[in-house]
Image (cartoon, rainbow, N blue to C red):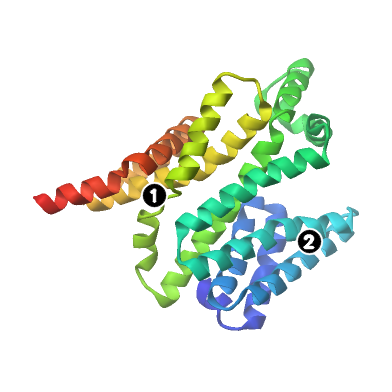
Amino acid sequence: MASFIMAGRAQAAIFIVLSTLISLVLPPLGLFSGAAIALITLRISWQQGVIYSLLGSAVLAIAAYFFKQEVVTGILAGLIGWLPLVFFSTLLKQTHSWERTLQAILMFSIASVFIFHLYQSDSAVFWQSILEQIKPAIKEAYQLDNSQTKELIEKASTLMTGVFIAMMSIASTLALLLARHWQAMLYNLGGFGKEFRQLRIGKNPAILMVACIIVALFSSSTLIVEILIIAVGIFMLQGIALAHGIVNQLEMKPFWLVGLYVLLFFLLVQMIVLLAAFGIIDNFVDFRRKIASKTKLK
């Protein structure tokens, strides 16, 4: 895929158009269009990244028109999803620092929560109106009656801003990681693995998250909880990178990582929280450095 994207402008445009259209049916595959835009930004320029973001947004606008939806909504969906990714890709390209890039993603996501709440004075009502549109699907998925479904929607709507922005930030980060992997496959074979295993967010964001946890324990602020939801998603990635780093340093068998991802699949929420906790702690302890120093002493 990476070689096809970088083969020329026509190939890149075809890939982004097709992956964007496919994502309308299978949303998780939208990761590939984002990764393609990030790869173009990393390898060529942010200007080219913006051009292909506009192309993808135009595809969404045309699809919205044919499905009798708001055309503006399609354009905004693309721009909101891809323009920040262009910025983060440019930051990574210029700084060569995942730490600064992840900090930027975290701070941008937190700022987005505040901006959304300023724009929507009653965010719960906004999300209830969205969730009501998929009420039958929620009812069927969780095998609930009408009253239980209504109660679930009311509870979920209070935190949906944080959940939605957390999903967006994780999607952007995964797209950027995939783009970096593709870049390494083409121009720096083996470089991504080493880079990913050293991934960390930094002590200051970790201190901020610990402070938020303490505040959340003694208050009922949904805003703090939403910030924590976003942070958990980002720090989870450091937890995964930590696991990869330890397995590599100790020369452990790959099935340990397979086991990790199996647990992540079957115990999603519990494993996300656990990995995020280790990700936060790692910024204070630096497990990988300690293991490296002990390995040298042997």
Secondary element under disc 1, as helix, strand or loop, is: helix
Query: Circle 2 sits on which residue?
Result: 60
Circle 1 or circle 2, nearest the eye: 1
Residue type at numbered disc 1: Ala
Quarter holding residue 84: bottom right
Residue at coordinates 41% horizontally, 43% vertically from top-left? 239
| Mark 1 closeness class: few <14, some 14–19, many ≥20 residues within 10 Å | many
Residue type at numbered disc 2: Leu
Task: Mark yes or no: residue 168 visible.
Answer: no
Task: Mark yes or no: residue 73 visible.
Answer: yes
Secondary element under disc 2, as helix, strand or loop, is: helix
Say left or right for 290 vs 232: left
Residue at coordinates 76% horizontally, 55% vertically from top-left? 77
Say left or right for 195 vs 291: right
Rendered image: mark on residue 50: none
Say left or right for 98 vs 57: left
Rendered image: mark on residue 241: 1
Mark pair 1, 2: CA separation: 34 Å
Query: How many numbered marks does the figure carry?
Result: 2
Looking at this view, name the residue that lies furthest to the left: 298
x, y percentage for residue 240? 41, 45
Quarter holding residue 157: top right
Query: Considering depth in this image, is 215 or 190 the residue closer to the camera?
Result: 215
Q: Do tag 1 and tag 2 residues touch (Cβ < 8 Å)?
A: no
x, y percentage for residue 78? 74, 59
Compared with 92, 11 (above or below) is: below
x, y percentage for residue 241? 39, 49
Residue at coordinates 80% horizontally, 30% vertically from top-left? 128
